[in-house]
Image (cartoon, coloured by chain):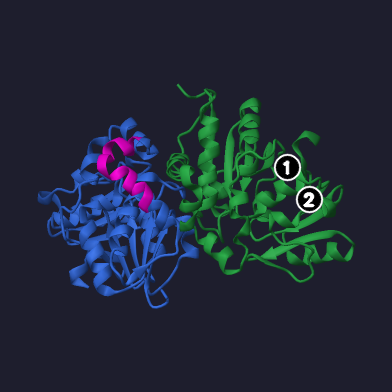
Chain colours: A blue, B green
């Protein structure tokens, strides 16, 4: 009955991704607090390309070549870098028309894992509806890959996975048999009417607070500020429209 | 503030367990549909020991030596075995005082992974309160290890993880900073008042139905039929009281 429909799946952490891999799928990478929210913001503010790198050493090499570099580990900006992970760092007057090299705890790893897919997109609440519309229009399987935290499940990415899944599944060409999708949708519906209260449960919310980095939480949970979708092209991120 | 408290954590699938390993913890293995529900039932019905084995070859070798053998893959009983995974198989008149060799899709793997822990216990709704009481009494960290399905998250094990977490966290000596615990508790509270309706979402529920194996679903979700807790001793399962 559902054989000809497109599948929606949620992968709660990159550690589980090998069992989800599907090269025909659109993979949406999610790291709400804060990497993917920051990447979307950078493109909203006119960045030309973002080059994700896996190691701090690579990031430092790019810095030495004159690139703007965003690099953090566990929420802390590295001393050689221009930016960390805060969306507020990526201001129009600094980044417009430039290339940025980006190394984060989880996000880069996820992008690399999914690079063989039909499309690798960068997702967040900021571009939620644009993502759903694109997936429906392309009529493709969807895997929502949550960056999580050190290979573990996290709440903030899973809630977003619920929001995006629910939106795509409203379309008759998509279906799911993935328990993670159902759980995510239920959690999203518990949280959606008072996200800031719900997100108090999230460990990452408290890690950010401890480091005085929690000023961005409301912003990162703002719906549909943009139609922009960053996408992987070869080894860098650009606007989906440029693919 | 919570430094001296005992931690509660939920590991949604064995693939994530390496990041949870804590040899001082009590690990409760959960495979509600149906392996751990069946093991608890076997001990309720007087089995002496259950020897978990990883491969079908080992199970077959034991069969050739005269043991009773439970062995299934993907819900289907293997032709050389005496039982599959249904709790209804483990009847008093067949198993009382006997040893059973048990190889299942997920359960055995989980037991082996956790064998270095302070205690490895077999959990299900059938012995929920007994488990919570033991964890509280021992004043130990708790890891609830969900067997999941082929390394993926599943709904039925996660709901149980929420039930057990919530119960243990009511005790002042336990705390959590694990997002999986909060998510599990919220899902459990969505489901608990009408479990049979909620479990319709679970893929395993439909896999069992397809194979006419879903007669046990209500039974496996019955609360507190017993105070018995199966526990790992060396390389076999016995009653916790025998340790």
Q: Give the CA separation, mark 2 to mark 1.
A: 9 Å
Q: Is residue A204 magenta?
A: no
- Sequence-wise, the earlier of marks 2 and 1 is 2
Foreground residue among B188 and B147: B188
* Residue topped by disc 2: B50
Q: Under tag 2, what secondary structure?
A: strand
Q: In x, y percent, where is residue B102?
A: 75, 57
Q: Residues within 10 Å of mark 1 (few under 14, many from 20)?
A: many
Please give the name of the residue rendered at 34% of the width and 54% of the height, measured from the top-left corner: A162
Q: Chain of mark 2?
A: B
Residue A80, placed above or below residue A40: above
Q: Is residue A189 magenta?
A: yes
Q: Chain of mark 1?
A: B
Q: In x, y percent, where is residue A72?
A: 33, 45
Q: Residues within 10 Å of mark 2 (few under 14, many from 20)?
A: many
Residue range (magenta): A185-200
Looking at the rendering, which quadrant does residue B190 occupy? top left
Q: Under tag 1, what secondary structure?
A: strand
Q: Is residue B222 left or right of residue A105?
A: right
* Residue topped by disc 1: B230
- Answer whether labels 2 and 1 touch (C-beta < 8 Å): yes
């Amino acid at each position: 009955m559902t054989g000809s429909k497109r599948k929606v799946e949620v992968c709660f952490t990159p550690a589980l991704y090998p069992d989800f891999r599907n090269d025909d799928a659109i993979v949406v990478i999610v790291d709400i607090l804060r990497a993917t929210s920051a990447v979307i913001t950078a493109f909203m503010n006119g960045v030309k390309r973002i080059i994700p790198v896996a190691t701090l050493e690579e990031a430092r090499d790019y810095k030495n070549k004159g690139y703007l570099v965003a690099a953090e580990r566990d929420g802390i900006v590295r001393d050689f870098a221009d930016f960390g992970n805060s969306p507020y760092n990526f201001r129009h007057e600094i980044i417009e028309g430039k290339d940025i090299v980006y190394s984060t705890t989880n996000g880069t790893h996820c992008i690399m894992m999914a690079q063989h897919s039909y499309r690798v997109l960068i997702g967040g609440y900021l571009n939620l509806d644009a993502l759903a519309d694109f997936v429906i229009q392309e009529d493709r399987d969807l895997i929502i890959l949550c960056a999580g935290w050190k290979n573990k499940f996290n709440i903030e990415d899973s809630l977003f996975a619920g929001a995006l899944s629910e939106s795509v599944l409203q379309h008759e060409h998509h279906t799911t048999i993935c328990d993670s999708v159902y759980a995510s949708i239920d959690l999203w519906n518990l949280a959606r009417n008072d996200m800031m209260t719900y997100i108090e449960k999230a460990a990452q919310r408290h890690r950010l607070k401890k480091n005085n980095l929690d000023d961005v939480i409301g912003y990162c949970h703002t719906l549909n500020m943009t139609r922009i979708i960053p996408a992987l092209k070869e080894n860098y991120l650009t606007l989906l429209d440029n693919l």
